[in-house]
Amino acid sequence: MYQIDQEKMKLTKIDSTVLKNENMMERYHLQQYIFNSWETFKNDVGYPGAILLGQEIRPHDSVQDSIDLLAFDQNTSCLIIIELKRDKNKLQLLQALSYAAMVATWDSEKLITSVRNKDISTEALDFIKNYEPNQNVKIVLIAEYYDPEVVLTSDWLSTNYGLDISIFSVQLHKLDGKVFLDIDQKYPLPELSETYESRRKVTQNSTKQDEASWEDVIPKLKYPFAKNGIDLCRRLKGEGDPKRRRFMHVIRNYGFFDMISFNFREKYLNIYVNCKDKNECKNTINSVIGKHIDITEWRDGINFNIEKKEEYNKFVEWLNV
């Protein structure tokens, strides 16, 4: 990593460091940093629709170890095992696989019981109350370094058996006494994600058919324009997915935006945009709603939250729907 000196037109290398040298531990530091920053960090590990269920979750009564972080992917109704290591550890993948095998047998009652005391929100409980045992548990490995066999084994398991495994490395850098963390995807390579996906032999997810409706959801949403937004989406897209409180790809090919999806969270309306030019999309949102809007990038575009009625009115007026 380099610092750019625009006056001298040169690059100055920023010193790199490691967790050990900064007295940072795997559980008490790296894990806590991710836990406290999940709303932005989830985009960098490729799960913008995931909700964090808790940390230090015991996967089975027969073991004393615990899952570092456990999340739930709303898009596929799958659990996500997130296993962290300082430095590197050849057994990291094996540990994550054993945890995945254990939680794959959980039903909704076991899942709720396991996470109930982990500061999980009422909204998150609503999402997982109809969870059914799902063999397609996803695995995310995060460490500073990896032995080649970890990546090779992950590729073999993913390609031949359809396991969903992602591998990320974290690097620390220091500048003027401040420590910066960068995250880099090691597997699958972002540029080849579609190729890896096509090679997987993934079975259909099994989820319960419940009777959730938007009429059940609306009273739980704590912003005045929620019903108006849901009615708008229903008019444009049909019923959407009330169980996951979302309408996918409501609007297509609008300006710089390829697709726009609406996610009705408990305290705000979350908008996801698929776009190629992220900077242009950010500038557009800032000019339409205001520069105060906090915009986050994800792999295929940007996302942002709308909390106030005046912000919602500006956005809808601009969409011209």
Image (cartoon, helix red, strand yellow):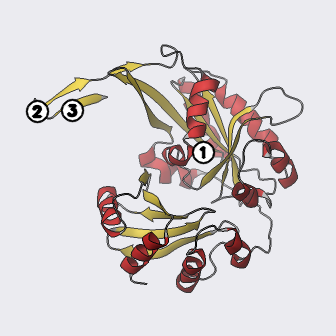
Classify 10 Å Cα crowding around label 3: few (below 14), some (14-19), many (20 and above).
few
Q: Is mark 2 on a helix, strand or loop?
A: loop
Q: Residue at x 22, y 24 (%)?
A: 12
Q: Identify the image quadrant of residue 253.
A: bottom left
Residue 312: % across, % down: 46, 72
Q: Nearer the viewer, residue 40 or 300?
A: 40
In the image, residue 166 lies at what x, y percent?
57, 41
How far apart, in angstroms, are the residues tagged by discs 3 and 2?
9 Å
Where does label 2 land, which residue?
7
> Can residue 152 be seen here?
no
The residue drawn where x is 48% and y is 44% is 44
**Residue at 34% of width from left, 57% of height from top?**
278
Question: CA separation, marks 1 and 3?
Answer: 41 Å
Residue linked to disc 3:
4
Q: Mark 1 points at which residue?
A: 159
Which circle, 1 or 3, is nearer the viewer?
3
Q: Is mark 1 on a helix, strand or loop?
A: helix
Q: Is residue 176 left or right of residue 229?
A: left
